[in-house]
Amino acid sequence: MIIEKNCKSIKDILNNDIQVNGIIYSPIFGDLEYLGEDNGLKFRCIKSNNIVIFRENGTYAEGGDILLFPSKENRCWENVPIRYPNTKEELIDMLCKKNNKKMSDWDKAKEHNLYFALRYICRFLDSLAVNLEKMDYCNKEWVVYPVYNENNGLNLEWKVKRRTDLFFHFGFYTKTAAEKFIELMKEDIKVWERNVYQFDYKRNDTSDLSDREVSALISMWNKKS
């Protein structure tokens, strides 16, 4: 998954799009984890665990060639991996652009079935994790779960933990994706939570829906408005 942008510098793309802990590639060091700015662009070599510093223009030495690239396959800095969004608006905008839809289509999807809409967000964040963290599709190892308030069943706090059983509402490939879900979608989670927990706030036995069930939202999303 890529986005096109008019970039000013490699430093700007690293800080604004790839961000700290993102992975890029160098033909002399292999995969590198970006650690931020420290008298240059600081990286950790994935293979050797050594720390290396590049110049802000992507060169390793003054007057040298650019030796930093978005990935081994992609040597163009105008096409960079999409980062995790920082706001809910940015997240929905990314989702709509990916599917060639409008914000109003997202609003209709929420009205149709908020739970399916939230699950669709989960899938989108997982797709970002696969792209950004150089990983294969895998089992959902991290889950978002409610911590119950005994005095007020509607006042739940949502946290992230490693998956320990087969039952969960929202599952993710990575902890970062799960944390982003809580951070950015907390208002919509709250609305869904009140609908689900108002009668039995200790209910936590909803199994993960099948792909066929979740595809109902995707089908609706793909219909012309």
Image: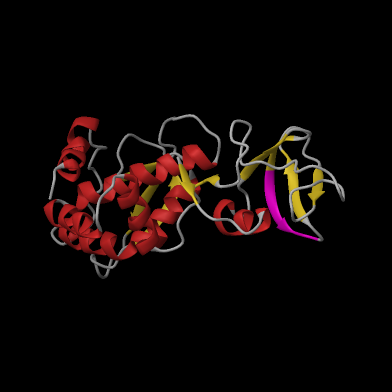
In the image, what residue occupies the spot 75% across and 40% down? 67
Q: Main secondary structure of the magenta part?
A: strand
Q: Nearer the viewer, residue 108 or 73?
A: 73
Residue 186's place in the image compared with 160, above or below, is below
State the image quarter where residue 201 is shown.
bottom left
Apparent side of residue 68 relative to residue 187 in the rendered image (left or right): right
| Vertical relation: 134 (above or below) 41 | above
How was the colour assigned to the protein in this rendering?
A: secondary structure
Residue 142 at least partly seen:
no
**At 55% across and 35% down in the image, what residue appears?**
134
Quadrant of the drawing holding the N terminus:
top left
* Residue at 75% across, 43% down: 66
List x then y, in percent, for residue 180. 44, 55
Measured as percent of width and height from the top left, residue 151 is found at 27, 70
Residue drawn 25% across and 69% down?
A: 152
Q: Is residue 71 left or right of residue 35?
A: left
Q: Is 59 on the left-hand or right-hand side of 21?
A: right
Q: Does 210 appear in magenta?
A: no
Residue 26: percent from left, percent from top: 72, 37
> Would you say residue 34 is visible in this rendering?
yes
Seen in the picture, residue 157 relative to 50 is either above or below; the reply is below
Relative depth, front residue between 152 and 122: 122
Q: Quadrant of residue 215?
A: top left
Query: In this orientation, which residue lies closer to the viewer: 52 or 126?
Result: 52
Q: Is residue 64 left or right of residue 76?
A: right
Q: Residue furthest right?
A: 62
Start-end of magenta stretch: 33-38
- The percent position of residue 178, horizontal first and vertical second, equals 42, 50
Residue sticking out furthest to the bottom = 151
The total of numbered circles placed on residues is 0
